[in-house]
Image (cartoon, rainbow, N blue to C red):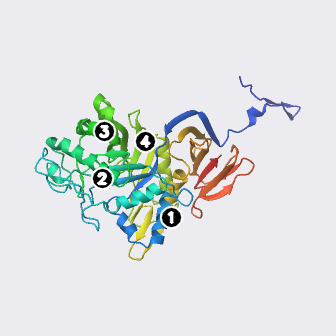
Amino acid sequence: MLRAVVAVTLLGLPAVHPAHPAHLAAPPALTVNERVRHQEIDGFGISQAFRRNELLKALPRTRQREILDLWFHQGKGAGLSILRLGIGSSPAGSPYDHMVSIQPEDPGGPDAPPKYVWDGDDNSQVWVAKEARAYGVRRFFADAWSAPGYMKDNGDDKNGGALKPEWRRAYANYLVAYTKFYAKEGIRITDLGFTNEPDYTATYASMRFTPEQAAEFVKVLGPVAKGVKVACCDSFGWTEAKAYTAAIEADPEARRWVKTHTGHTYASPVDGPLPTGRKTWMSEWNSSGDTWNENWDDGSGYDGFAIAEAVHDALTLGGVSAYVYWLGGSRGATRALLQIDDAAGTYHVSKRLWALAAYSRFIRPGAVRLEASAADQAVKVSAFRNRDGSRVVVALNTGTAPVTWKGVRGRATAYLTDGAHSLAPSPVRGRTVTLPPRTLTTIVMQ
């Protein structure tokens, strides 16, 4: 039991009784409890669907390598470990308005022998996948925006529409065939999704599923998708994703097949976990905005600071095992991590990349999130233990005053990201790290 420390006044002079140091010590700035463990981390990633890889391919080889390093190199860039691939989809009314499908024409009905075609390139997605694999990427998530139009009730791969019930088995076989074509190219598709934003009708490739319809289709796809993890359902918002997860969890057979529950955060942000004991991924998001923005902290909502907050919330509030950003690189007024100017043969880097890299470079697949808290509510902190035993603490100081942490252990290096620094390393002395205001600091302890 703690005893009260009493100061009395005797003859007008204060007399202070000796106090136990614990009574006077302020709580540590950051606290990590390694005994309390949360989700296992699958990784962090990007998508280059909708033919964005062709922008990269148009650059000189030296520029290509620089961009690939920024995405996948663990020392020079973000060290991303997941690549999300698009199965037969391109947005309408854009430079990328071209649908590539492994079965573009109706074979004659759902029971007719399929007529698959494969060009070995898949809009340069195969090339980028091979490059990613050379950097050590082992998680390839293939996701379909829509079934071919002839399989749907609107006869079009665009503008929503639903999968016809009689085409369910043929569509499942179509998706599995896609993974087999990649296997022939030396790329193992590890995760397979059959729908993207099933609750949103887009003018580009899109297809509607209700939560109940998605659960029914899972029971068709699961038995034939051997060797891959079925993912569902990439809902338009995190709150909306909960209905899809709940429908699958309520059906024992559907629950058996879905290994990863996925959701986007356009309609609603991550505010808590999805209702499942399975792994969950934040599988697509970028912030809204109408300009190319390279800034760290300008209050725009699509600066680097905003991305750091979104990643932190997904990991800690949502308990996600993966965070996949949209997109790795694109052109014009994009909110991608990079702006690629194929005409000029160059590119530009945003602070969004370095905000994501402050997590992805150091928190490796197989890491486990540890319980972490901060004495100052302005500091958002998360902690992880990698398989090699290293510990990673990531602290986002959202306040206007510096915060000092004196609890660093072992050999450690701090990496600072702000307006002037992009993962700038600095040694830790005296077990102390200072978190400047409005900065992101990653501390790696060996």
Res. 283 mark: none
Q: Secondary structure at mark 2?
A: helix
Mark 1–mark 2 contact, CB under 8 Å? no
Give how far apart the Cα atoms at labels 4 and 1 are: 26 Å
**Measured Cα–Cα span from mark 1 to mark 2:** 41 Å
Farthest-out residue, top:
1
Mark toward the start of the polypeptide (3 vs 1): 3
- The Cα atoms of the two marked residues, 4 and 2, are separated by 38 Å
Residue at mark 4? 271
Assess disc 3: are there few (<14), some (14-19) or many (≥20) residues with their C-alpha within 10 Å of its C-alpha: many
Q: Earlier in the sequence, mark 3 or mark 4?
A: 3
Picture coordinates of residue 373, whole percent (x, y): 59, 40
Left/right placement of residue 344 relative to residue 308 reads left
128 horizontally vs 315: left or right? left
- Amino acid type of the residue tagged 4 in the rendering: Asp
Residue on which disc 3 sits: 244
Give the mark nearer the N terminus: 4 vs 2: 2
Contact between marks 4 and 2 (CB within 8 A): the answer is: no
Say if residue 279 shows up in the picture.
yes
- Observer-side mark, 3 or 4, equals 3
Q: Earlier in the sequence, mark 1 or mark 2?
A: 2
Viewer-proximal residue, 212 or 410? 410
Name the residue beneath numbered marker 2. Answer: 181
Residue 235 to residue 59: above or below: above
User: Disc 1 marks which residue?
Assistant: 295
Q: Secondary structure beneath disc 1?
A: loop
